[in-house]
Image (spheres, rainbow, N blue to C red):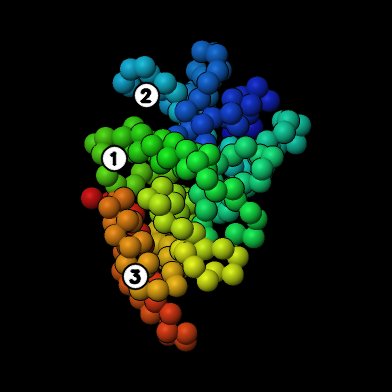
Amino acid sequence: MSRAPTAAQRRVIDDAEPVTGRLRGTPAQLAALVKRGLAFRHPRPPHDHFLTPAGHRIREAPPEPGSGPGPGPAAETPADADSGVFAARVGGEAEAVPAGPARAREVHSAWQGLLELRRMTNPDGAADRPCGWERTHLVRAAALALEAAGHRPAGPDATEGYRVRATPQPEAVAVSAPDDGTLAACAATLEKAGWQTGAHTEPRTRARYLLASPRRR
């Protein structure tokens, strides 16, 4: 097993942009992260550095003892106000998430960052289908696509808006909504964002829901 990043390297990793993983650091720090497989240098100008999937896993894991402060495991709910880390709303959150222009700007910025991440990491530079980061963060990625398109997430009582949840199926999330019209609108949004969806009925409750998976082509 490779040794843990140094405290200085961990700070650079922790300070990466939340969605794109764009890094800021000295040339020596960035080169060291590249050498360890935690970052890569983008081949196109301005040749910025970004976290690799391994680097993202380091950022989302608890820090090694003695490596200094760092974030805990990534949750599928909005980050608390003190963390300063953006997370899309998956629906049903108990915490109050501020709405309004500031939240709209955060969501728009995160979505644009995700589109850029697609362009940089998909082999053909395509931005119309999900990238590797989305396939390892399915719930957050689907929720961001919905929230960025203006859909309303469900509140704690789940009486209105969408909810996105993990499923036992690989590369699939479940999206629920209180009525067929909202569910159809969510399906259209996800398909436009590069996901494939299918409508299903829960046998016991007869509730309708979507199964959504990132499209590969």
**Mark 2 and mark 1: Cα distance apart in space:** 16 Å
Write the residue at 24% across / 36% down: 124
Most extreme residue toward the bottom, as rendered? 204
Q: 31 and 209: which one is in front?
A: 209
Mark closer to the observer (1, 3):
3
Write the residue at 43% across / 80% down: 207
Query: Vertically, is 203 above or below 85?
Result: below
Q: Is residue 181 visible?
A: yes
Q: 131 and 158: which one is in front?
A: 158
Image quadrant where residue 197 sits: bottom left
- Secondary element under disc 2, as helix, strand or loop, is loop
Mark 1 belongs to which amino acid? Ala
Mark closer to the observer (2, 3):
3
Q: Is residue 37 visible?
A: no
The percent coordinates of residue 147 (x first, y second) are 44, 51
The percent coordinates of residue 158 (x first, y second) are 54, 69
Residue 181: mark in rendering: 3
The percent coordinates of residue 11 (x first, y second) are 63, 26
List the residue tagged with mark 2: 42
Mark nearer the N terminus (1 vs 3): 1
Mark nearer the N terminus (2 vs 1): 2
10 Å neighbourhood of mark 2: few (<14), some, or many (≥20)?
few
The percent coordinates of residue 161 (x first, y second) are 47, 64
**Mark 1 and mark 3: Cα distance apart in space:** 27 Å
Residue 127: mark in rendering: 1
Number of callouts in the render?
A: 3
10 Å neighbourhood of mark 1: few (<14), some, or many (≥20)?
some
Write the residue at 40% across / 52% down: 150
**Mark 2 and mark 3: Cα distance apart in space:** 42 Å
Query: Vertically, is 24 above or below 172?
Result: above
- Secondary element under disc 3, as helix, strand or loop, is helix
Mark nearer the N terminus (2 vs 3): 2
